[in-house]
Amino acid sequence: MIRIERPACPNPTALNNQNYKHPANKAALRQASYGKCMYCESEIGHSDFARIEHIKPKAEDKFPELAYEWSNLGYCCEVCNNSKSDQYDTITPYIDPYAEDPSDHIIFVGAVIFQRQGSERGELTIRDIKLNRPELLEKRKAKIDDLHKAINAAYRTKNISLQAAAINALDDSGLPDKEFSLCIQSVLRLHANKLN
C-alpha cells in the first residue's frame, strides 16, 4: 500500500446523478493508483474486476451520505473490496492511502506486512482486508526472488557499465507504478549501501 494522490474528479455531474461508477471517474482513480489496488497493490488486469471502493462504507447503517462523495472513493481489487466489505471503525479507521502515507502505519519484512509498533490502524487494515493472504504472499515472494536475482547479478559483474544498468533497473522496480512497490522498496533499502 502506497500513498496515492487523488486526482480532481473528471465528472462531478455523474456523482451528482448518483453514479459513482462512471467510466471517466473510474479511469481517473485507476490512473492515480497506476492500475493497482489501493490496498494490496496488485495489478488489476483486464480479466480481473476492479471495484470502486467506498473507503467509508455506503451501507445504510454506516455512511450512506458519502456514497457519491469523490473523497470517499478509491480503486480496489475484488478480493480486497470483498474482504473489507462494510466493516469500518470510526475510532480506528482503516488506512486511507489517498489521505495519508500508509508507511506511517505498516512495514514490510520480506513479503509480509506488519503494523508499525503501536499502530492499531495498521493492524486492523492488515487483518480485516487480509493483506497477508496466501496468494499475495506468494506473488510478493516471487517479486522479491526476482529482485534478489537481479541484485546478485549487479554484485557479480565487474563491468561498471553493466553494474550501473543493473542498479538503475533495480531502482525502477520500486517506483510507484510497479506492482508491490512498497514491498520492493523495503528490500531495496536493505541493499542500498552495497549497491551504491
Image: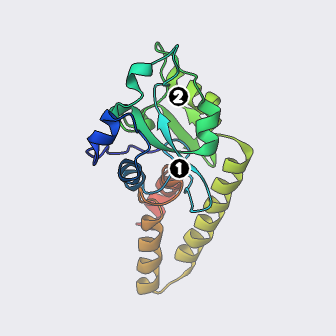
Q: Is residue 24 left or right of residue 181?
A: left
**Percent position of residue 77, x then y:** 57, 46
**Percent position of residue 37, x then y:** 52, 48
Q: Residue at x 29, y 46 (%)?
A: 11
- Among the two numbered marks 2 and 1 on one chain, the one whose residue lies closer to the N terminus: 1
The image quadrant of residue 12 is top left
Q: Nearer the viewer, residue 21 or 124?
A: 21
Q: Is residue 99 visible?
A: no
Say if 11 sits above or below 55 in the image: below
Q: Residues within 10 Å of mark 1 (few under 14, many from 20)?
A: many
Render colour scheme: rainbow
Q: Nearer the viewer, residue 77 or 62?
A: 62
Residue 13 image label: none
Q: Nearer the viewer, residue 18 or 108?
A: 18
Q: Residue at x 44, y 43 (%)?
A: 21
Q: Residues within 10 Å of mark 2 (few under 14, many from 20)?
A: many
Q: Residue at x 44, y 37 (%)?
A: 102
Three-letter code for the amino acid on which mark 2 is drawn = Gly
> Residue beneath label 2, please?
122
- Which residue, as the protein is rendered here, is positioned at the far front? 17
**Percent position of residue 87, x then y:** 58, 22
> Residue beneath label 1, please?
41
Callout 1 secondary element: loop
Q: Is residue 139 left or right of residue 93?
A: right
**Which part of the image, by quadrant, shows the C terminus?**
bottom left
Nearer the viewer's eye, disc 2 or disc 1? 1
Q: Is residue 106 visible?
A: yes
Q: Residue at x 40, y 47 (%)?
A: 22
